[in-house]
Amino acid sequence: MHYAHLGTTDLRVSRLGFGGMSLGADAAADRRLLDEARAGGITLFDTADLYEHGRNEELFGAAFRHCRTQVVLATKVGNQWRPDGQGWDWCPSGAYIRQAAEASLRRLQTDYLDLYQLHGGTLADPLNEVVEAFERLREQGKIRHYGISSIRPNVIRRYVPDTGLSSVMLQLSLLDQRPLEAVLPHLAAHGVGVLARGALAQGLLAGKPAREYLGQPAGAAHAAAAAVAAVAKRLQRPPVEVAGRFVLDTPGVTAAILGIRTTAQLAEALQLARSAPLPPDARHELLQLAPANTYQEHR
């Protein structure tokens, strides 16, 4: 397993993170999967208060309460469930962030969060209020670092470099190259860590049938998957590894967060985490064969 510091912080994370959003079908199996992931060297575990109405955090809390200092717990805030449980509303107020942090701490059975992330963000958010809430939580020792999870360049620029933001979680894959245009260079210039999700493009780069993705036609997904398959065949490496290495090898990326639900997916993730970088000519080939895309909104 390889490790890196998140941006310019002292927070050292595994370069492959465990995304817990897909867990929840079988608590006992999920618990074993989390234990196996930690045993395999994964230290970064990402969840959100939104997932399963908080039960995802409870699962993480039960799994890691006995080894808290050996893992990096990241969770998210900002989406408030409605009283009837039928959907949620965006709520980035300082009061709600502080209230939600206390609830997440209880569910995660810990007295501090390693990384607390705003789960989205808009230009209409009360920026000063949001940052003040995060800073207060940090002063109180309840969070170590804070970040945002956003795919909106205009929101990211609003937070960087004018706040104490430590990281940005964004979407990146061979089929979603949008961050390469300006966002990643901007974050790298300011020492902000990057957690990249979606490396496999919902499985489209790992064997699922081609379909429309992010407004791109099925043909674009097919071309990207074919590029991955061609490089994988030439290098004699699995397609999951090739698609994942494209993300991990991208300058500025601290870690890739993979959604893991089964032991087979965990085995693939661990193989990816321990793999060597792609040769430069292989990366060039991927970029030549797969169509690039750019942000059309929120620029």
Image (cartoon, rainbow, N blue to C red):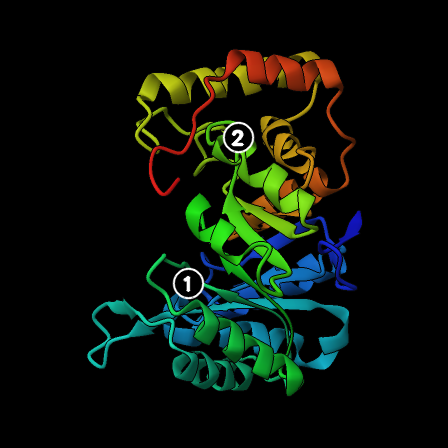
| Residue type, mark 2 in image | Glu
Residue at image coords 36%, 43%: 298
Q: Is residue 203 above or below residue 221?
A: below
Q: Is residue 53 visible?
A: yes
Tag 1 residue = 25
**80 or 14, which is in the foreground?**
80
Tag 2 residue = 181
**35 or 20, which is in the foreground?**
20
Question: Mark 1, mark 2: which one is toward the viewer?
Answer: 2
Q: Is residue 4 above or below residue 97?
A: above
Pick whichever of labels 1 and 2 is earlier in the sequence: 1
Q: Position of residue 173 (x, y in %)?
A: 52, 33
The reply, left or right, for residue 63 in relation to residue 279 is: left
The reply, left or right, for residue 277 in relation to residue 180 is: right
Residue 120 lies in quadrant: bottom left
**84 or 67, which is in the foreground?**
84
Q: Position of residue 162 (x, y in %)?
A: 57, 60
Residue at image coords 43%, 65%: 24
